[in-house]
Amino acid sequence: MELDVAKKVLLNRYTHSVRASQAVLQYGVGAMVDFPNQTLMTAAPEYWKEQVIQIHDERLEKVLHVDYLGLPAGQDDPNGRDGISYARFPEWYFCPKCRKFQPITDWVKEYKRRAKQKQLNSDPDMVKFLQCPTCRQDLVVTRIVVACECGHIDDFPWVQWVHCRNMIGGPKEVCPHPSLTFKTSASSTEGLEGLTVSCEACHARATLKGAFDKDILQELDAKYQGKYNFRCTGRHPWKHVREKCGKYPRVLQRGSSSVYFPITASSLVIPPYSSMITKKVENSIAFSKCKDAISDCKKSKVIPKEYLPAMVKERIEQYLNEIALEIGIAADKVRPILERRWIDSENEEDYSTFSVKYRAEEYEALSGEVSLPADDYGDFLREGTNIDDYAIPHVRSISLIHKVREVQALTGFSRLKPVEADSSSDESEHIVSVKEKETNWYPAYEVRGEGIFVEFSNGDIEAWVDRFPDINSRVEVLNENYQKSFIGSSRPRRITAKFLLLHTISHLLIKQLSFECGYSIASLKERLYCSEEKDGKQMAGILIYTASGDAEGTMGGLVRQGRSDIFPGIFKKAVESAMTCSNDPVCSLSLGQGRDSLNLSSCYSCSLIPETSCEEFNVFLDRGTIVGTYENREMGFYSAQLYNGTSWNNNESEKPVQNTSSDKKRKIYFVDAGVDLRDVPYSDIWKSIKVWSDDETELGLLSELEKRADEFSAKEKPYQDCVFLLEGNQEQYKCDLYWKDSGVAFFTIDNEECYVVAKGTNIKCFFTLDNDASADALLAVLKEK
């Protein structure tokens, strides 16, 4: 369905701007934004589709069934000069001097009648300065709106209200030409009774007393047989659409949290989707053409469904060489990426961001079960560690995530009450999609950061639960409270002792890490991995990562805290901090506190963190699972270490096979593979390097290599101008040539400093000024192609 094309007027980019993350979350599509001189509502993405930067997360795009995700472009980006579009809502404004009260359309009409031509030329629609044309006072937007549970929203029915609730002479007929005024009492103690709306045409007068009473509009319609029709108008101001709706709306304050609940889907970009090759393919112009061509095929009503796979393969072959040529990578490496995206995903069932399968893919990448070559990590870089160096009880492995990208997409919203994206069909009617069905993208934003992944021993957790049956009794209390809660009635689930344990440890670690690493607690975020073998994958891990990095990520402070010389102490402090709470014994003895009584021994004084940092919005927490309770101190997962003198260095948990190098050499990670010279003759390769050299020794070696170019013809071809990082260091270095399969890097005198850094690492380094540098030496270390 095509949306109505509304007139667009450019706003001041300095006073009317929001951050990309705000545009996707609290100020997303359908939400009101308070700017300095007016309140606006973020318009449908169809109105600002040209103002976004396309970003990709292949897994998330499959789940959401879109071609790409749109990041609102910045002011300096040529694609985002006009910025996000907004709609005028609320529409009722009053003048604080003459007290005139009317919709913005009437104010604009009056402004056009009274304004001088010069004003009309510079501001024809009264956008820059919302002032009363008579008094020259800034207009004030109304603070009250009405919304229904189906997501519709509209201005409060001021005209009907003042006539229906007339204080002098009782209810009146709605006059044909109402003229309202809005007055406030001089006393602040009167509350809603001090806010008076009057109709100057028929002298009706009413206060707002009782306006916020539950079902007040429905009661008024019942009392007067629907004479004033207070039913929902079915309006979506953000896309200029009205729908049929027979429900009665509720009266809300404009800034109430109940007005807007965003529904988002988040995902980590993991191997193989995070590789540099994938990134280059997705950013190419030819890929965009291929994507549009395949999208047109899928949308076509002429092409039979059984012929669609063949058409998709044909389009891939059509654009394959063009993509490969544009990014300088062999076609046989590009083809698997395109086929994985459009062919291998055709029959994905039960695949959502909430599914175990989706989380299991992340778990495998974080734990090292799935990985990429060290020189092709792209947006995801994991460093495995030797768990013996940590010796933390019950911890199976620790991974340092140097680089990770999280993508969060806004898929919809609800009003009056929060609704989960995977709610039952009974609740789905309360979810409003932010886009039309035909639109092939969702608004989204991405953040690059770092993290620490801690994997716990499933065997130890199972043994602990079997040993202390009282744990399950505490878990059942939470499950009963959840079933009685509002969310529990629409989204059934069962909490396990393992989940309660992992979630509470995660919160304690976040609080302790915020003291140690310099990040504020709101800058850290958790991601929980908890399931059993019967669900499809046995998982017991937590990822703590930074959620507020800039475009290039963060500075390595969190990863540094994950090293074996620091993290065991942090972990110990975090667990010990759970032993006491300033609210004890009330907190420890609690059998239900927090929202819907979904926490046991947990409050803001001990283990709660900012809700934006928690996956579960600060519920399902219990310190008793870690340190025990007053009645049974031995019940805690770490009670032996806390009370019985068991050493913290005693780790008898199951350990995974460690992929550590025996020589302990520092590793190099290539962040840019450079130019693929697969199709370039070796004579041209040596000649292109020689032309930039002015050192006699180096020129002599390069001349020898050029003369013996034929001997290299059977050897592997290199990549040129490759950029790499040294393990534990975020500074970038460069080598002239790199043979990937052979693990050999070639340095000229221009990159001598980079050679010094790379020497002694996990790759073989060849420097043109070394005494033993020769054509024979290089031939000896290169592999056959």
Image (cartoon, rainbow, N blue to C red):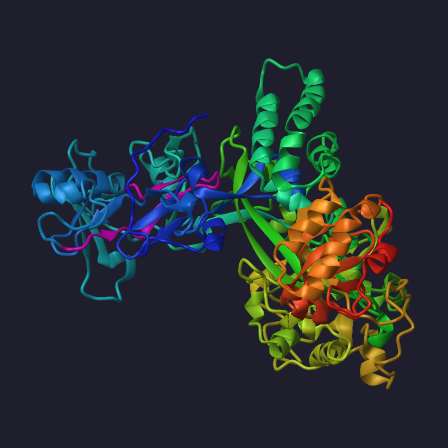
Between 261 and 131, the one lying in front of the other is 131
Instruction: Name the outermost residue toward the bottom.
Output: 645
Q: Is residue 743 magenta?
A: no
Question: Would you say residue 610 is visible in this rendering?
Answer: yes
Q: How many marks?
A: 0
Judge by depth and name the residue closer to the eye, 431 or 406. 406
Residue 153 sits inside the magenta stretch: yes
**Residue at the spot x=40%, y=33% of the render?**
234
Q: Position of residue 93 (x, y in %)?
A: 23, 48
Quadrant of residue 516 within the rendered picture: bottom right
Q: Position of residue 712 (x, y in %)?
A: 82, 48
Which image quadrant is residue 602 in? bottom right
Q: What residue is shown at x 25% (from left), y 66% (from top)?
A: 188
The residue lying at 85 percent from left, 60 percent from top is 777
| Of 717 and 161, the residue lying toward us | 717
Residue visible at 61% across and 23% down in the picture? 298
* Magenta part of the chain: 137-157
Q: Where residue 494 sits in the image (x, y, percent)?
A: 74, 52
Q: Which image quadrant for residue 161?
A: top left
In this rendering, position of residue 430 left or right of residue 767: left
Q: Is residue 470 above or below residue 578?
A: above
Q: Nearer the viewer, residue 767 or 482?
A: 767
Tell whether 430 sits left or right of 601.
left
Q: Is residue 187 above or below residue 46?
A: below
Quadrant location, the C terminus: top right
Q: Position of residue 11 (x, y in %)?
A: 29, 48
Let me know if residue 423 appears in the view.
no
